[in-house]
Amino acid sequence: NQYTHVKIPPDNPKDGWTTEIHVDIDSWFEKINKVIYKGNLLIVDYMLEANRYYNAKRHEGTMISYQKQRASSDLLSNPGHCDLTAHLCIEHLEMIAEKYNLNVLGNVRQGQALLALGLSEKLHELQHFPSSQLNIALEKRENLLRLVDPRCLGELRWMALEKCDQNITNSLPNKLETSFLREDL
């Protein structure tokens, strides 16, 4: 099995080393498996490779609180008024996807995906705004850059999966054609 190299806990963790266990991932994939007979699935979320996710230096896990676009590790600072999130482990997703006969086509960071899909052209188009609309152009640029900034949404990962109908003989894979997975950046 290609996932046996994942070691939980990692070597030499600090006392109190913590990580998240995503107990609903398996049931989520099971539900997906029941409704998709053939097709493609795109998962967009914060994800880390296992060696970064289950790392002794990541001793407090990946949970984080967001309020008004500000991140905080103090999860209980303003209960009910913050969004709480945790990263996913890429290899764990791949392992569960494989269990439900989903082919992992690949994953990329959101910044790479959006650039491959034409974000740079959108940014370039902003130079054509009239000078009287400079404030609008700057706001649009700021919003677009947030999507690729690693400190903002640029670290989101896009994982593409493919499901072939196992009940149909000679069912050919979909071979999702997507430039965000094909493009070398």
Image (tube, rainbow, N blue to C red):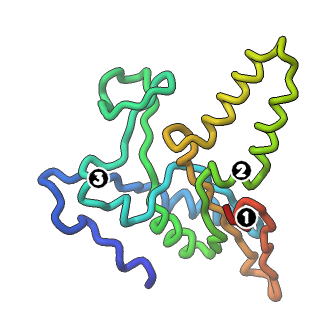
Reading the image, the residue beneath label 3 is: 58
Q: Is residue 31 left or right of residue 51?
A: right
In the picture of the structure, the residue carrying the numbered disc 2 is 115
Give the residue type at disc 2: Leu
Pointer 3 or 1: first along the chain? 3
Q: Quadrant of residue 8?
A: bottom left
Badge 3 local density, few (<14 within 10 Å), some, or many (20+)?
some
Q: Position of residue 20 (x, y in %)?
A: 34, 52
Q: Is residue 66 above or below residue 24?
A: above
The foreground one among 16 and 49 is 49
Give percent across and percent down for residue 152.
53, 37
- Real-space Cα separation, disc 2 to disc 3, in angstroms: 29 Å
Q: For this view, does 129 lie left or right of residue 103?
A: right
SS at badge 3: loop
Coordinates of residue 66 in the picture (x, y in percent): 44, 30
Q: Which residue is mark 1?
A: 183
- What is the quadrant of residue 167 in the picture? bottom right
Camera-side residue of 67 and 102 = 67
Instruction: Specify the amino acid type for callout 3.
Output: Arg
The answer to whether marks 1 and 2 mark residues whose Cβ atoms lie closer than 8 Å is: yes
